[in-house]
Amino acid sequence: MIKGGKDYLDFRAVLIMLILNSLWGFNYIAVKYSIQGLSPIFTSALRSIIASICGIIYCVGRREKLFHTDIRLFHGFIVGLLFGVEFACIYVGLLYTDAARSIIFVNTSPFIVAVGAHFLLKGDRLTITKMAGLVLAFAGVFIVFGGRPTTARPSMFLGDLLQLIAGFLWGLTTLYIKRFMAEKVHPIHTFLYQLVFSVPVLIGLSLLLEPHWIRKIDQIIIASVFYQSVIVAFFSLLIWFSLIHKYPVGRLSAFTFFGPIFGVFFGTLILGEEFTFSLMIGLPMVCLGIFLVNWRKSTPNHPRTGKTDGLEV
């Protein structure tokens, strides 16, 4: 039982988790729209800048300390560095691959965390259930990776690979947080450090790799950037933080398997992406794997927030 909270998920928590997963799944669609007019890494930097401003305003309003002045600030910088490179891979990768495929590959991160935690962290061992989830999920990823749409270009391989690298970096970030920051910083600081310190990383990469930042601007692109930064990167994470303080995070994390489902659904419905046979087979395998790896009888903490398993939006 969580102090001041519940040891089960009530209807309200389940409904909120479904809404959050739909927001996170649609985020990949919003990115696809925004990078039609803006360079991808610059778009990611813009997202971090806007979400950082929202986070700073929130912290000031609550009179929370913005930055630490000890080793925790260094750890925050490392997390921001990893976070920035991760999102550069996601945004650039979406130039070459489908949103439906992208969200599946990025969501390999819980499996990276499960394996890494077994060797690097105390008290977080691989169980039979977790290993079954790992095998199932990686088989699903292999199937999706190998079965491409009929209209796929050779460059889709590059996009898929970048999404897999992003999933690895997300998992690595989670492990770093669990090893060096969990229980030492408030979740809002982990959230803020990721965003703030990712900005110079993304701006630097954009200056190095992208000669033109803006090709066109319209209402859809502006709305998509607003959605990515304010609705997803800021607002949805604040709701997530409130949930993990009230409900068992292991059970909440188990619901993140809906993220790939919503992502594939929106990709095929809105973007007209091909729902291939490999997606049909691989998607449920990956989703069930996420469920098995995340499910725990009780987990008081969450990693990506400064407490236990990761979350990527």
Image (cartoon, grey):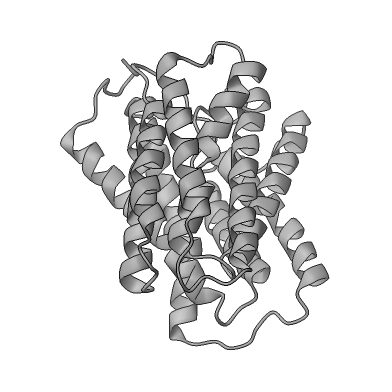
Residue closest to the eye, 229 or 162: 162
Image quarter (top left, top right, bottom left or bottom right) of the N terminus = top left
| Residue at screen point 39% across, 54% down | 279
Residue 260 visible (yes or no): yes
Where does residue 183 sit, x and y in percent of width and height?
A: 57, 22
Q: How many marks?
A: 0
Residue 23 visible (yes or no): no
| Residue at screen point 53% across, 48% down | 106
* Left or right, residue 212 beside residue 235: right
* Left or right, residue 83 beside residue 211: left
Residue closest to the eye, 306 or 311: 311
Q: Is residue 214 above or below residue 170?
A: below
| Residue at screen point 34% across, 19% down | 2
Where does residue 234 sit, x and y in percent of width and height?
A: 48, 54
Where does residue 267 sit, x and y in percent of width and height?
A: 38, 65
* Left or right, residue 93 beside residue 264: right
| Residue at screen point 41% across, 41% down | 286
Q: Is residue 255 above or below residue 236?
A: above
Please tell me in which quadrant of the rendered image residue 204 appears.
bottom right
